[in-house]
Image (cartoon, grey):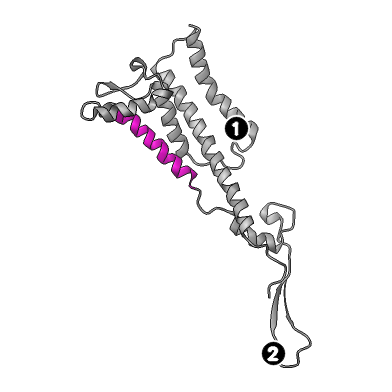
Amino acid sequence: MMRVSRHPGNADPIAKKRTLHLLPFEYNGPARGSREPLSFNHIAMCPLTRCPSNPARPLLVLLWVALCCMIVAAPLLVVHFPALAAMLYLFFAPICHQNPDRSFIIAGHALAVCHRCTGVYLGLLIGSLTPPLRLGSLSTPPQRRALVVCCTLPLLLDVALSSLGIWTNNMSSRFSTGLLFGAMLSTLLVSGIEELIDRHSWKMIRFQTAHVKGGIS
């Protein structure tokens, strides 16, 4: 509702001013999926509280691409750039046993990580390239817990049964279980970081933006 009023007590026509009053009004609740009325102040704040571009996904994609390239580059650099190849192997040594019998071979040399770790890093890249989680699709904590269990259980069984002598894992089982686990981890990681950035942006903008009053002169 808009109302135009004249300031009383001033007989001079030139000195008269017109003031535009924007009174609080209700917005159609069902149209926005809520039964609560939406005031003018909320409408003014909504466009400001949504981050136009979230950098989490592209940054994580670049990170996983760089790591995958480093894994593959290590054996390719052994002949002509042995020092650089040694640095790459040392970089991944703390997180992988780097057993040549359990690693893919390229150009006569093993990758910088084993079969399972190769699957994990590739899964991290694939998971970061998938569309983000939407409402109704793994949006609740129980659904996400179920996803974690379903993608982690095959890896744990592959390791545990092999350690007990019940099952002998192979290249395919190690790589596939690592790939599944990495894809799940990256999907949840990207969604979590994006949600964290969005919430931080909401708080910063609400802190920096002046509260809109009922009337504007």
Percent position of residue 57, x then y: 47, 43
* Residue pointed to by mark 1: 144
As drawn, the residue found furthest toward the right would be 9
Tell which of 71 and 171 is nearer to you. 71
Q: Looking at the image, is 57 positioned above or below residue 72?
A: below
As drawn, the residue found furthest toward the left would be 80
Label 1: which secondary element: helix
Would you say residue 69 sits in the magenta stretch? yes
- Magenta segment's dominant SS is helix
Tell which of 71 and 95 is nearer to you. 95
Residues packed near mark 1 inside 10 Å, few (<14), some (14 to 19) or many (20 plus): some
Percent position of residue 23, x then y: 73, 69
Q: Residue drawn 48% across and 10% down?
A: 163
* The residue stretch that appears in magenta: 55-74
Would you say residue 83 sits in the magenta stretch? no
Nearest to viewer (mark 1 / mark 2): 2
Find the distance from the CA under tag 1 to the CA under tag 2.
Answer: 66 Å
Tell which of 204 and 175 is nearer to you. 204
Q: Residue drawn 60% across and 32% down?
A: 144
* Residue pointed to by mark 2: 15
Q: Residue drawn 68% across and 59% down?
A: 42
